[in-house]
Image: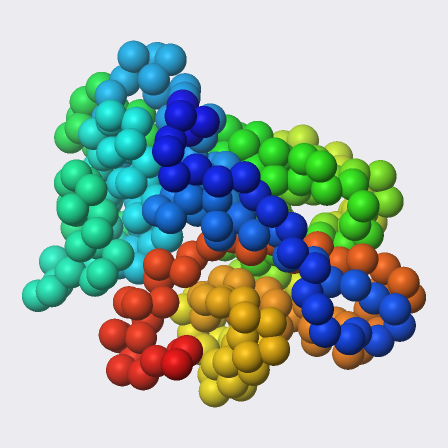
Amino acid sequence: MFEDWKELNESRIDLIDFPLPMEIKLSVKRDDLIHPKVSGNKLYKLKKNLEKAQDDGIDRIVTFGGAFSNHIAATAAACKYAGLKSVGIIRGEIPEELSPTLAEAQANGMFLKFISRSDYKKKNTPEYLEYIAKLFPESYIIPEGGANLLGIEGSKAILEGCEDYDYVVCAMGTGTTFAGLVHARHLGQKIIGVPVHKHDNLKDDIIEIDSSFAKLMPSSYEILPDYHFGGYAKWTEELITFMRSFHKKTGLVLDPIYTGKAMFALLDLLRNGYYAKGSHILFIHTGGIQGIEGFEKRFSFRIYD
């Protein structure tokens, strides 16, 4: 399906050209560049889900997210390109003005249904999913963030051809991408996940989706819970200053919700001697750049000049 998209690009890996201690090298897998609208891990998580819907003869996708959700934006665009209808169940009341993310999703044909935050908390319960199935019959339902087994399976492809790296670092939202990376890791690799929100039981959430994750060697991965900067979509001046400085040095654009926090964590570990001498680190750029516009509008300042 996605292979036929005209704007689809091959993922590339860029070596970051600035000196690091202990002969360590840092490369970035530029999955943010694989497609202008369905970029980063979103493409990998959606691919097998949309293919399953089409194989089952279903032409409408229903999924969940917030006003600035990368997943909502990517799902709307992917469904438009694939000739599928899309519905977004959006957390919160109908706003006076749509966020840039939701406005674009709507422009790409997504029907937006706003629900209360209390109802949104029930989104994964059998009762609420049954209600959604009745409201939108003959639909294929994808959980928030693409967090299901097919999302994990699709994420495994991120590490294809990435054998020559000792550590792989990525941001964690639902943990779906992280789980796929841990499953697909190459011999000797360690996968490092950086949760972008306060969550003490993220591993348990992954196991609830994928019971086989519990059988993977704990030494093959690590989840670092202390780099969320206050919680999901929270930020500090320290984070923004870091992102600006990193951009000036490398030209790499990071977002404040996911990749900015993950790169901050990666370099903080470096300063604290976490990585072995001479190791090569691979950072997965999971996209999310579309969310910068909404962030800047919400907080009334520009991150980058």
Residue 244, position as x, y percentages in the image: 51, 80
Residue 135, position as x, y percentages in the image: 15, 30
Residue 117, position as x, y percentages in the image: 25, 57
Residue drawn at 73 percent across, 62 percent down: 26
Residue drawn at 61 percent across, 34 percent down: 157
Kindly indicate the quadrant of the structure image that contains residue 129. top left
Residue 155 vertical placement versus 91 (above, below): above
Residue 226, position as x, y percentages in the image: 62, 71
Residue drawn at 47 percent across, 87 percent down: 237
Residue 128 vertical placement versus 54 (above, below): below
Viewer can see residue 122: no
Quadrant of image for the C terminus:
bottom left
Kindly indicate the quadrant of the structure image that contains residue 201. bottom right
Between 226 and 293, which is closer to the camera in this rendering? 293
141 lies left or right of 288: left
Viewer can see residue 305: yes
Which colouring convention does the figure follow? rainbow
109 lies left or right of 80: left
